[in-house]
Image: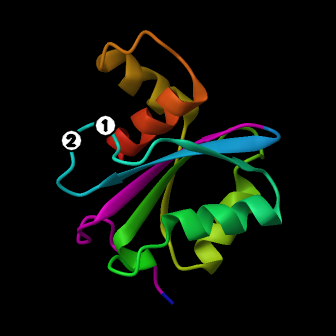
């Protein structure tokens, strides 16, 4: 199966995921929404149960997984298990270098830093 051409897909939803060793925080931004995600960022555990809860949280009967983009930072090796869960469920991902997210946040003049704000910034970057 060939990889999708990300330039030809119009995503209807973007999820930004800030990853840490024991948990991860996600924010979801729907197409046409303003910069702030409509749903408050939510934290999930870095385990199978947390991945399943995240996939349910992403679930939207009107937006199939192929029309959703998950933006994850490549933080150590902490992102790999989540990326596998997303891939298995059919979601499209962008795995980015943490420096990209850092400089994107600087360009937006974001001075505050928290997991929730980082997740929102990643959703906006997507």
Taking the magenta stretch, the answer to whether it contains residue 8 is yes
Task: Reply above or below: 79 against 90.
Answer: above
Image coordinates for residue 27, horizontal then vertical, percent: 47, 45
**Element carrying mark 1:** loop
Q: Residue 1's spot in the image, x, y percent? A: 51, 90
User: Real-space Cα distance between discs 2 and 1?
Assistant: 6 Å
Which label number is shown at residue 34? 2
Q: Quadrant of residue 48?
A: bottom right
Q: Looking at the picture, does residue 113 appear above or below residue 72?
A: above
Label 1 Cα neighbours within 10 Å, binned few <14 / some 14-19 / many ≥20: some
Tell me: 67 left or right of 90. left
The secondary structure that most of the magenta stretch takes on is loop
* CB-based contact (under 8 Å), mark 2 and mark 1: yes
In magenta stretch: residue 111: no
Q: Residue at x 32, y 79 (%)?
A: 62
User: In this rendering, would 107 be left or right of 59?
Assistant: left
Could you tell me which residue is drawn at 23 percent across and 58 percent down? 31
What's drawn in magenta, residue-wise? 2-20
Q: Residue at x 74, y 59 (%)?
A: 50
Establish if 45 lies above or below 57.
above
Image quadrant where residue 53 sits = bottom right
Q: Is residue 120 visible?
A: yes
The image shows residue 45 at horizontal and vertical percentages of 77, 50
Identify the secondary structure beneath mark 2: loop
Label ID, residue 36: 1
- Residue 4 visible in the snapshot: no
Measuring 62% from the left and 61% from the top, which residue is drawn there? Answer: 54
């Amino acid at each position: 199966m060939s990889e999708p051409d990300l330039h030809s897909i119009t995503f209807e939803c973007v999820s930004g995921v800030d990853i840490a060793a024991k948990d991860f925080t996600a924010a979801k931004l729907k197409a046409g929404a303003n910069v702030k995600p409509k749903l408050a960022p939510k934290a999930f555990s870095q385990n199978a149960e947390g991945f399943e809860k995240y996939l349910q949280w992403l679930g939207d009967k009107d937006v199939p997984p192929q029309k959703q983009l998950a933006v994850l930072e490549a933080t150590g090796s902490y992102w790999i298990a989540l990326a596998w869960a997303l891939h298995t469920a059919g979601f499209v991902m962008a795995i980015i270098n943490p420096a990209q997210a850092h400089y994107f946040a600087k360009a937006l003049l974001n001075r505050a830093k928290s997991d929730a704000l980082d997740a929102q910034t990643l959703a906006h970057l997507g």
